[in-house]
Image (tube, grey):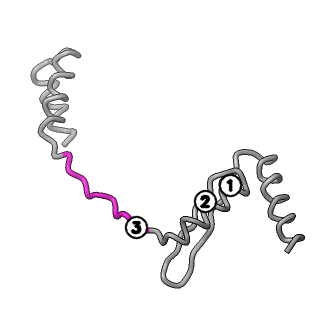
Amino acid sequence: MLKPVVDKILKEGMNVRQLEQYIHQLNDTVSRETKPKKQEKKDIFIKQRETSLRERLGTSVTIKQSKKKGKIEIEFFSKEDLERILNLIDQENLSS
């Protein structure tokens, strides 16, 4: 697709404004349809656990679950933030 565009630019000696208009016309003809992202229906109990962890840890928590396994993602923003989160988890373990 690039070579025919370059050839046309060179053949017609387009200036910048003409090139911009030509690219705009090309973009208008391109289909913009994309597949909608598959919306996963998250179990209400998983959502509640995410919310509970988010409130306890003070950061974003995502629980991803498949048929046989899953993972918990805990976001942190710095080394200090990681230490804070790990300390909260350790305190939770000690009180259990």
Crowd class of label 1 (few under 14; some 14 to 19; many from 20; radius 10 Å): few
Q: Which mark is residue 33?
A: none
N-terminal of the pair, mark 3 or mark 2, is 3
Q: Are marks 2 and 1 in contact (CB under 8 Å)?
A: yes
The magenta region covers: 32-41
Q: Main secondary structure of the magenta part?
A: loop
Q: Quadrant of the N terminus?
A: top left
Q: Verify CB contact (< 8 Å) between mark 3 and mark 1.
A: no
The circle on residue 51 is 2
Q: Residue at x 16, y 25 (%)?
A: 9
Quadrant containing the C terminus is bottom right
- Mark 3 to mark 2: distance in Å? 17 Å
Question: On residue 40, which mark appears?
Answer: 3
Q: Nearer the viewer, residue 88 or 78?
A: 88
Which dot, 3 or 1, sits closer to the camera?
A: 1
Residue 55 numbered mark, or none: 1
The residue positioned 49% from the left and 77% from the top of the image is 66
Residue at the image point whose x is 84% and y is 71% from the top: 93
Kind of residue sitting beneath label 1: Glu
